[in-house]
């Protein structure tokens, strides 16, 4: 038989608040990444090849941030289950 | 108060539900972020490949004496998708450029009446002799294709990135 789900206690509420914060940060990172991709594409089409490298590095750094948040979300998951 | 049977079976609490849906949203956002990185990486690879193709083998692009004075011939160089144009100006000189506008990649065309290259998308204008920007939004000159006239035809022998030289050298501004 399955165990009943944990009651929505203060832990769950704290996790929910942390999750909201992480999502807000993720949205900010995503907007920045969209801007970087758009700017790199425009620059590439205009013939500036060097800007592709700068764009890729910036995007990688931003992705590292969002991956960090992903790990945070996963960690948040464990005690909450 | 007894819990209805379906509650036992499905056991969803609204806080749990909210938590799960937000967690899913978070994961989706991270995946989208990975997609953006993939886009940037793809651009980087494309830019690298183009850089590697700077030293190129000669290719025959037109028959001897072609095109006629004031006329234009289209060809592709160095790759089949790289469209270029070869113009013989009224003074008999040959000039070749990439056809891709340096603003947003529309195809530029030769205007024989004005003896210049024009981009119809946003009214960009380039010199037909140097490729320099004469008017409009393009930020850089057109990449020039080095050409050579040999006994058996006209050959493209390389691609030179357009330098930001003084367009007034050209003498055909306006
Ligand atoms: S694409 Fe040529 S002027 Fe904009």
Image (tube, rainbow, N blue to C red):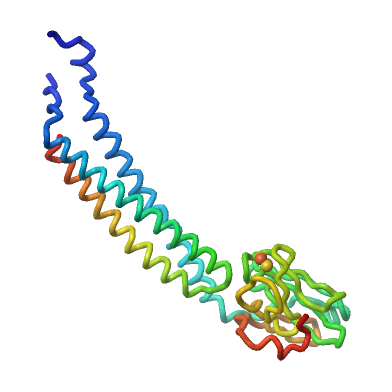
Q: In which quadrant of this rendering is ligand 1 seen?
A: bottom right
For this rendering, which residue is in front, B28 or B153? B28
State whether residue A2 is above or below residue B54: above
Percent x, y of residue B7: 21, 15
Question: As drawn, is B4 to the left or to the right of A41?
Answer: left
* The N terminus of chain B: image quadrant: top left
For this rendering, which residue is in front, B55 or B125? B125
Percent x, y of residue B62: 79, 76
Q: Residue at x 14, y 37 (%)?
A: A80
Q: Residue at x 87, y 84 (%)?
A: B90
- Which of the 4 image quadrants contains residue B55? bottom right
* The C terminus of chain B: image quadrant: bottom right
Percent x, y of residue A18: 20, 45
Q: Is residue A49 visible?
A: yes
For this rendering, which residue is in front, B73 or B122? B122
Q: Residue at x 16, y 11 (%)?
A: B3
């Amino acid at each position: 038989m399955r165990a009943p789900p944990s009651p929505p206690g203060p832990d769950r509420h704290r996790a929910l608040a942390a999750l909201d914060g992480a999502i807000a940060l993720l949205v900010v990172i995503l907007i920045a990444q969209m801007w970087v991709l758009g700017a790199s594409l425009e620059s590439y089409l205009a013939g500036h090849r060097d800007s592709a490298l700068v764009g890729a590095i910036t995007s990688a750094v931003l992705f590292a941030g969002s991956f960090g948040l992903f790990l945070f979300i996963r960690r948040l998951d464990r005690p909450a289950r | 108060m007894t819990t209805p049977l379906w509650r036992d079976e499905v056991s969803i609490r609204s806080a749990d539900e909210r938590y799960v849906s937000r967690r899913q949203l978070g994961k989706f956002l991270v995946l989208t972020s990975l997609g953006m990185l993939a886009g940037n990486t793809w651009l980087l690879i494309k830019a690298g490949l183009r850089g590697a193709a700077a030293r190129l083998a000669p290719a025959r692009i037109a028959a001897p004496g072609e095109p006629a004075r004031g006329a234009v011939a289209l060809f592709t160089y160095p790759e089949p998708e790289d469209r270029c144009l070869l113009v013989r100006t009224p003074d008999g000189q040959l000039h070749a450029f990439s056809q891709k506008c340096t603003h947003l990649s529309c195809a530029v065309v030769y205007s024989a009446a004005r003896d210049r290259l024009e981009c119809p998308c946003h009214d960009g204008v380039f010199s037909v002799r140097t490729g320099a920007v004469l008017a409009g939004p393009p930020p850089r000159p057109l990449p020039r294709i080095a050409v050579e006239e040999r006994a058996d035809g006209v050959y493209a022998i390389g691609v030179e990135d357009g330098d930001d030289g003084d367009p007034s050298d050209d003498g055909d501004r306006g």
